[in-house]
Amino acid sequence: MLIGMLAGTFTGLVPGIHINLVGAALISGTFSILAGINPIYLVVFIVAMSITHVFLDFIPAIFLGAPEDGTELSVLPGHEMLKKGQGFQAVYLASVGCLYGLFIFLLLIFPLYFASLFIKNLPGTIIAVGLIMVSLNMIFLEKKKFIALFIFLLTGTLGFIVFGMELKEPLLPLLTGLFGSASLFFSIKQKTKIKRQKTGEKMKIEKKRALFSSAIFSPLSLFLPALSSGQIAIIGNQFAKADRKQFLFMLGTITMLTMCLSFLGLFLISKTRTGSAAAIKSLIGVLDWKIFILIVFVILVSGFLSFFIVNFLSKKFLIVLEKINYSKASVVTIIVIAIVTFLVSGFLGLIVLIISTLTGIYCISSGVKRTNMIGCLILPTIILYLI
């Protein structure tokens, strides 16, 4: 568990290194180097790594503008707070949300167990219709509806093409380009300067509506594949009416719940909604109740410890960030992303990264929400269930 937390800290802090990469490497190595290790140990490692990653991932997302799928919405409100000297508070709010997400997860286990008995074998057409409705809801919330629809279809087509390629880890260049490097290029262009950050004060916000929305809408991720925590947060915010700070808190809660519920989904309906859950299924197949209880224990312990780790490291991160040129840090981050993409996905992955980055830049310039770019996952999923 501790080694998994260490790995999750690394994957969370380094842009472009996703837990799915580690999980895939773990599975491919299971038959050679790791052949003699009890799969239960690997399961514990994956769960601890995943939970820690969710906490730590908000640091580069908010401080560097290099998010992964799920934290992409934290970039805008997080950056605004960072420019005002409240970067630590932004990460703190998201991490508190993650902590609350752990306890809401415990409360949802039994209700979702009974719900799964009725919708365990949900027809593919129903799932596709559900995804279409969620996507249309997101598009109709935009002022520029036609541009939002165009971006959704554009990124959806891009995703469909990328998934059809012989590409190792296609999500790495696709999502990193759309949500990560595109934002970094804008930071360079705007010559963002970081004010001295306030790390002493911790903000208090009204949490009830955000927590209620998170508990009600997060289970959508269990039954509608490809639905990101960012999209669920947008749906939840229609009810919560959260301000910038409350939204960061709610996004942390929903992002954590989405990860935890993916393990519950593997136990209840034998479906994988995250790369981590898919890796566990490859290792041990369907979960029995004893292994699930072990997973819940690891979630709680690693999550509780990660809360303190993220607050400690965010202060250290800010000390370094205040001393360096932010534009230069963004350039270095882009170079790291490009190198990682080339090493993992090859030259073809690098081309996908460039195309995805240009698409992301167009979306940011168009003035619509970046969550419309999650069409890269949703549209291929809709097509898959309709064919």
Image (cartoon, grey):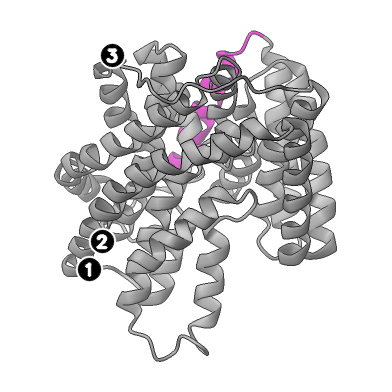
Looking at the rendering, the stretch of residues picked out in magenta corresponds to 126-143
Type of the residue with mark 3: Glu
Instruction: Give the x, y percent position of residue 102.
Output: 26, 42
Are the residues flagged by discs 2 and 1 in contact, CB closer than 8 Å? Answer: yes
Q: What kind of secondary structure does the magenta stretch mostly adopt? A: helix
- Disc number for residue 206: 3
Is the residue marked by circle 1 packed among few (<14), some (14-19), or many (20+) residues within 10 Å? some
Point out which mark residue 137 bears. Answer: none
Q: Residue at x 64, y 8 (%)?
A: 143
Amino acid type assigned to the residue bearing label 2 in the image: Ile
Q: Which residue is mark 1?
A: 291
Dot in front, 2 or 3 = 3
Q: Is residue 234 left or right of residue 157?
A: left
Rendered location of residue 220, percent (x, y): 37, 37
Whether residues under marks 2 and 3 lie with C-beta atoms below 8 angstroms apart, the answer is: no
User: Which image quarter holds the N terminus?
Assistant: bottom left
